[in-house]
C-alpha cells in the first residue's frame, strides 16, 4: 500500500492558525517565587471529551490513532460493556490518553466559544509517530489538517469525527532546544507528512503501532483573553510562561516547552462556556499529595472555587474551573 496518502494542502485559515501558534516569542519574563510554582515533575494526563456518537468515536480512536480500550483498574472490561456504561477510556498500554463520555443529548459547541483547541499526544520515537501517522493516512486522511517542524518537536494535526483537535508529535532531545533567557524558541517550519512516514517507519513498529508507548504531552485551549489566561495559569496555578504573544500563551513546569497553551484565534472575547459537547476535563498530575494541597491553598487564596476530594488521603483530587469554565482536575502521582 502506498505511504503517500496524506493530502498536504491546507486552507488559508488552517495555515494561518498553525503559523501563528509557533511564531510565539516571549515579550517579557514573568517571575514567580519557587514556592508558587508547580513541581518540576508535573505532567499531563488523559483528556475527557463529551461525545455524541460514542461508537463512532471509539472506532476512530481505536483504528486511526491505534489506541486500545483500557479496562478500569482491577477489573476486566470489554469495549462493548464500556460503551454501555457511557464511559470509555482509551490509551496505550495502561496509560490513558482520552476518556470518552457519552452525552448524546448535549448541544454542540458553538463557534467562537472557549474550549479545546487540541489534545497533543506525545510519542517516544519518530518511528512510533510515523506508524500512527500511517494509520491516519490509511483510515482518516480526510481529517488531517496540517503539520509543522516546531524546532523543539515535529508535529502533525488532525480532527476527530466530532471536531476535537488532535496533535500527534515527537520531541527533539532537550539539548537541541534553544532558549532566550527562560523562554523557548519555537517556529513553524514545513514538515512533509509523507516524507516523514517514508523516512522513519519500520515494518516492526508499523505492524503493531498500539504496542508503542504514548502520553498526553500538552493540552491547548481556546480562551477569551490571553492576559487573563496568564493571570490564571501562571500567577495563580503556578505554571511558568515559556512563550507569549498578543493572541497565545504557552506555559510549562520544569522547563518543558509547554504543558498547556491558550489562544484566542477564534475565541477572542469569549465568556464562560456553556455546557456542550467537546472538552469535559483537562487532567494534570503533580508528584505528591502535598503538591495537590499546596495548589488548593493557592487557588483559595486567589478566590478560585475548588472541589477538594479525599484531602490528605490516597486518591486525593482537586477540581476547579478556569475563567472560561474549562474544567481542570489535578491529582498526585504518589
Image (cartoon, rainbow, N blue to C red):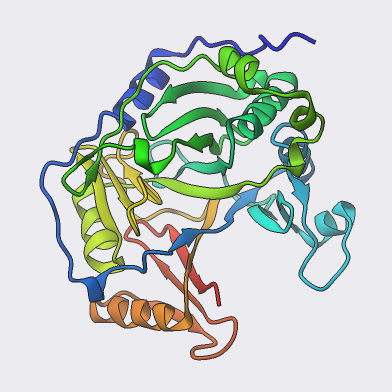
Q: Observer-nearest residue: 9 or 259?
A: 259
- The number of numbered discs placed on residues in the rendered structure image is 0
Q: Quadrant of the C terminus?
A: bottom right
Regarding residue 190, the answer to whether it shows in the image is yes
- Residue plotted at (79% across, 30% down): 204
| Vertical arrangement, residue 300 with respect to residue 53, above or below | below
Q: At which x and y percent is residue 274? A: 45, 54
| Vertical arrangement, residue 150 with respect to residue 250, above or below | above
- Residue plotted at (54% across, 72% down): 333
Q: Quick one: which residue is furthest to the left in this view? A: 28
Q: Quadrant of the N terminus?
A: top right
Q: Observer-nearest residue: 233 or 13?
A: 233
Q: Observer-nearest residue: 234 or 128?
A: 128
Regarding residue 277, the answer to whether it shows in the image is no
Q: Quadrant of residue 81?
A: bottom right
- Residue plotted at (34% across, 23% down): 188
Q: Quadrant of residue 239?
A: bottom left
Q: At which x and y percent is residue 60? A: 73, 35
Q: Is residue 282 left or right of residue 127?
A: left
Q: At which x and y percent is residue 6? A: 62, 13
Q: Is residue 5 left or right of residue 126?
A: right
Q: Observer-nearest residue: 160 or 111?
A: 160
Q: Quadrant of residue 27?
A: top left
Q: Quick one: which residue is furthest to the front in this view? A: 175
Q: Is residue 199 left or right of residue 13?
A: right
Q: Is residue 120 left or right of residue 257?
A: right
Q: Quick one: which residue is furthest to the bottom in this view? A: 312
- Residue plotted at (68% across, 19% down): 137
Amino acid at each position: 500500500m502506498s505511504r503517500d496518502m496524506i493530502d498536504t494542502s491546507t486552507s488559508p485559515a488552517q495555515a494561518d492558525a498553525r503559523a501563528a501558534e509557533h511564531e510565539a516569542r516571549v515579550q517579557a519574563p514573568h517571575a514567580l517565587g519557587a514556592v508558587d510554582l508547580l513541581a518540576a515533575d508535573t505532567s499531563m494526563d488523559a483528556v475527557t471529551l463529551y461525545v455524541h456518537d460514542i461508537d463512532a468515536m471509539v472506532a476512530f480512536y481505536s483504528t486511526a490513532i491505534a489506541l486500545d480500550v483500557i479496562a478500569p483498574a482491577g477489573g476486566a472490561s470489554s469495549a462493548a460493556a464500556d460503551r454501555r456504561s457511557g464511559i470509555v477510556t482509551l490509551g496505550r498500554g495502561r496509560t490513558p490518553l482520552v476518556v470518552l463520555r457519552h452525552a448524546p443529548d448535549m448541544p454542540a459547541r458553538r463557534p467562537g466559544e472557549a474550549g479545546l483547541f487540541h489534545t497533543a499526544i506525545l510519542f517516544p520515537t519518530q518511528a512510533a509517530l510515523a506508524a500512527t501517522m500511517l494509520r491516519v493516512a490509511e483510515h482518516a486522511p480526510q481529517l488531517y489538517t496540517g503539520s509543522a517542524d516546531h524546532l523543539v518537536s515535529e508535529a502533525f494535526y488532525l480532527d476527530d469525527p466530532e471536531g476535537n483537535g488532535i496533535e500527534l508529535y515527537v520531541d527533539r532531545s532537550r539539548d537541541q532546544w534553544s532558549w532566550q533567557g527562560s523562554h523557548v524558541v519555537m517556529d513553524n517550519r514545513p514538515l512533509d507528512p509523507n516524507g516523514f512516514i517514508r523516512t522513519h517507519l519500520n515494518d516492526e513498529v508499523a505492524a503493531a503501532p498500539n504496542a508503542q508507548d504514548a502520553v498526553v504531552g500538552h493540552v491547548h485551549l481556546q480562551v477569551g483573553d490571553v492576559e487573563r489566561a496568564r493571570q490564571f495559569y501562571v500567577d495563580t496555578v503556578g505554571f511558568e510562561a515559556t512563550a507569549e504573544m498578543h493572541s497565545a500563551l504557552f506555559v510549562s513546569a520544569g522547563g518543558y516547552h509547554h504543558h498547556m497553551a491558550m489562544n484566542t484565534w477564534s475565541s477572542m472575547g469569549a465568556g464562560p462556556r456553556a455546557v456542550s459537547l467537546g472538552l469535559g476535563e483537562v487532567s494534570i498530575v503533580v508528584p505528591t499529595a502535598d503538591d495537590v494541597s499546596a495548589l488548593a491553598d493557592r487557588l483559595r487564596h486567589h478566590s478560585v472555587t475548588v472541589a477538594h476530594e479525599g484531602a490528605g488521603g490516597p486518591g486525593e483530587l482537586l477540581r476547579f474551573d478556569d475563567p472560561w469554565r474549562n474544567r481542570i482536575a489535578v491529582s498526585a502521582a504518589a
